[in-house]
Amino acid sequence: MNIDNDINSMYPAMIFAPCIPKMSLILDEGRVHGARYYQVKPVFADWMVLEKWAIKTYGPVSNIWETNCGRWYMNDSVFWFRNESDRTMFLLRWS
């Protein structure tokens, strides 16, 4: 007896699909060392997928502790973008 097959036949995945939360993107703005940053906080997201894409797209992550106000960085489950156009590209890709 294969329990997995019995469960799958009794409860197809489509029954549970409406209960799986979809990713949401919360937008905000903030300042770091006096410079404006555009924020995106993904909710119910695969963070590693977003992180890999961002590094490939925007280059290495900036260090928040340096005062050079880098192009982008990640902190506390939030992506911080120096340029609004970078945030827009992120939104277009992931929303």
Image: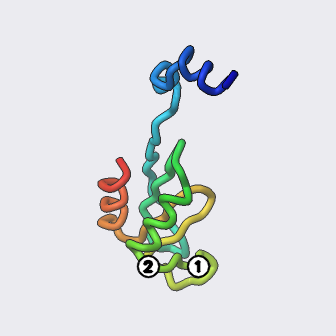
- Dot 1 surroundings within 10 Å: few (below 14), some, or many (20 or more)? some
Q: Please state if 84 lies on the left or on the right of 69 as rendered.
A: left
Residue ID at (52%, 70%): 73
Q: Nearer the viewer, residue 4 or 74?
A: 4
Residue 8, located in which quarter of the rendered image?
top right
Q: Nearer the viewer, residue 70 or 7?
A: 7
What is the CA distance from the residue labelled 2 to the residue labelled 1?
Answer: 12 Å
Residue 41, percent across and down? 50, 51
The mark closer to the camera, 2 or 1, is 2
Residue 90, located in which quarter of the rendered image?
bottom left
Residue that mark 1 sits on:
63
Residue 84, percent across and down? 33, 64
Residue ID at (45%, 23%): 14
Q: Which mark is residue 48?
A: none
- Element type where label 1 sits in the image: loop
Count of numbered tags = 2
Q: Is residue 3 above or below residue 82?
A: above
Q: Which mark is residue 59?
A: 2
Q: Is residue 12 above or below residue 73?
A: above
Q: Amino acid at mark 2?
A: Gly
Q: Amino acid at mark 1?
A: Asn
Q: Nearer the viewer, residue 44 or 70?
A: 44
Residue 91, percent across and down? 35, 54
Q: Is residue 94 above or below residue 7?
A: below
In this view, which residue lies farthest toward the front?
A: 1
Residue ID at (59%, 75%): 64
Q: Please state if 86 lies on the left or on the right of 31 as rendered.
A: left
Q: Is residue 2 above or below residue 91?
A: above
Residue 44, percent across and down? 54, 42
